[in-house]
Amino acid sequence: AQPGPGAVDQTFVLGVVGDVPLMGDWTGAGVATAAVVRGVRQGNLGDQTSLVWYPRQVEGTGQPDLIIDYGAPGDTPVAGNWTGNGVDTIGVVRGNQWLLRTRNSGGPPDIIATFGEPGDIPVVGDWDGDGRDGIGMVRGSTWYLRNSATTGPAEYVFDFGDPTAIPLAGDWDGTGNDSPGRFKDGQWTYSNRLTGGPPDGQFSFGVTGDRPVVWRRLGAG
């Protein structure tokens, strides 16, 4: 099914104002559930010395099922299925260094990759549909994507969307391949291709100031 406007299907509370939201399939159940990451902004919590992750492993309101220390203030949190085992795990981007864990626990990074340039906006998606997430950076209107979480050149380079809109990725057409999207002031645009050009679709959902996340359930498109 194509994404589009409509009424809210779920509303729940997790975390506090200032946390960064993410979605991930933390258990391999085929459902992306919510997490928040605290301490991302420099000085956000005063003496905060690490990022703290609070994932929920089931849908809806409730207490976090996990509490994980990983990353440092100023890092950008990311999550993905780095190994192809069906479970999303945590990671951070520090400058152009991707520091990824293959388990949802604290510790040193299991995967270290260099990709992009400091100041780029990181994105994560399964660009080739192989069941494993790759990494990406967005610089202005230009997207640079790799099929794996490894150091190397971009395998896809294209322009898509308003450079002032937030970049994100999703499987917009239900084919198993993620592709680019943008969000700004409640307006979503997306493409089903990794070749740039005009959007394949657009819709309204949310309001100015919202932070977009992409939700999925296996078999739900």
Image (spheres, rainbow, N blue to C red):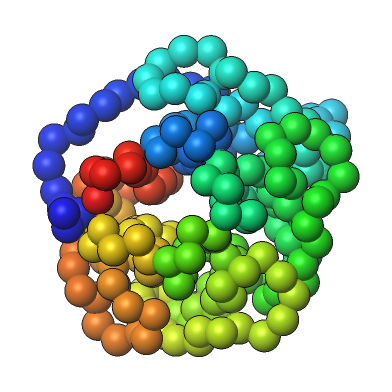
Eyeballing the image, is 13 above or below 214?
A: above
In the visual, does 92 lie left or right of 26? right
The spot of residue 56 in percent (x, y) is 52, 24
Eyeballing the image, is 196 above or below 171?
A: below
In the visual, does 23 lie left or right of 45? left
Eyeballing the image, is 148 above or below 186?
A: below
Is residue 215 visible in the rendered image? The answer is: yes
The spot of residue 23 in percent (x, y) is 47, 40
The spot of residue 53 in percent (x, y) is 66, 31
Eyeballing the image, is 47 above or below 97?
A: above
In the visual, does 212 lie left or right of 134? left
Q: Residue furthest left?
A: 6
In the visual, does 103 lie left or right of 24? right
- Quarter of the image for the N terminus: give it: bottom left
Residue appearing at x 45%, y 80% in the figure: 141
Q: Residue furthest top?
A: 62
The spot of residue 48 in percent (x, y) is 80, 31
Residue appearing at x 71%, y 70% in the figure: 150
- Which is nearer the eye, 207 or 111? 111
Residue appearing at x 48%, y 65% in the figure: 130
Residue appearing at x 58%, y 75% in the figure: 146
- Which is nearer the eye, 169 or 187? 169
- Which is nearer the eye, 37 or 84? 84
